[in-house]
Amino acid sequence: MVFIGDFPHFSYLSSSSTSTQEYRHIVRILGNDIPGEKKLLIGLTQIKGIGYNFATAILDTLKISPDLNVGDITDANVQDIERTITDPAEAGFPRWFLNRQKDIETGQDKHLLTSDIPFTLRNDIERERITASWRGYRHMSGLKVRGQRTRTSGRRGGAVGVAKGGGAAAVPAKKSSGGSGGPAAPQSPTGAVAAAPAPAADAKPEESEKKE
């Protein structure tokens, strides 16, 4: 189907965007395997660093249908998408649309993707710690950094509250050291062996000889 005239919202239905390419169950875009049955708009959001708005802007710029299945796009579409994602400024995206503005090392506006996001985050936190800034101290202490309240929130990590205490653990009973196999000596509740009762002081000794 070909439209005559200017129909920007239906330009993706033109014959230039359709082809006889076979359906692919897995499409690899920027090192990410995306299932072919997903819609292209949702499939692009599986790439770390690309959200719903960014994916919508990419497809609108390239005039590709967002409802098209990932497995139906052509190799040319994949190359155009990768080129736009890796260099959005060249495609005409505004500066505020990027997630890394005025990089501290290069001073350039970039858009970080995939593994570059956690790597850059770790470097930024380590730089704050080395310079001993207030943000660095907060990071080292595991506390909130952006001025949030911590009286009733941020309770994870570190020493918080009082640990629940229980009763003292019972001491296991000791076995008798005698080897005769007789019954064990009686024990007190604390685990100590009970001492034998002492003889009474007023007990009289038995007479050894009877009077004749």
Image (cartoon, rainbow, N blue to C red):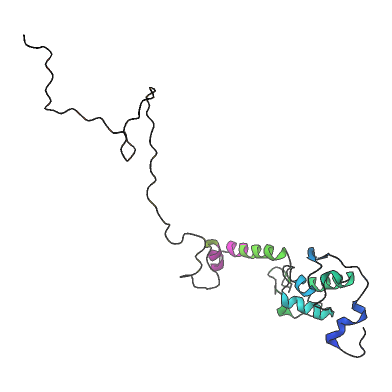
126 up-or-down from 15: above or below: above
- Whether the magenta-drawn stretch holds residue 132 is answered as yes
Q: Residue 118, position in %: x, y?
A: 67, 63
Which residue occupies the foreground of this view, 25 or 163?
25
Q: Residue 41, position in %: x, y?
A: 77, 75
- Whether the magenta-drawn stretch holds residue 2 is answered as no
Left or right of 56 on screen, residue 210: left
Which residue occupies the foreground of this view, 95 or 202?
202
Which residue is located at x 76 percent, y 75 percent?
Answer: 55
Q: Residue 92, position in %: x, y?
A: 80, 80
Dividing the picture into quarters, in which one does residue 212 lie? top left
Identity of the residue furthest to the bottom in this view: 5
Dividing the picture into quarters, in which one does residue 83 lie? bottom right
Instruction: Assign the N terminus to one quadrant of the image.
Output: bottom right
Which residue is located at x 65 percent, y 65 percent?
Answer: 121
| The residue stretch that appears in magenta | 126-139
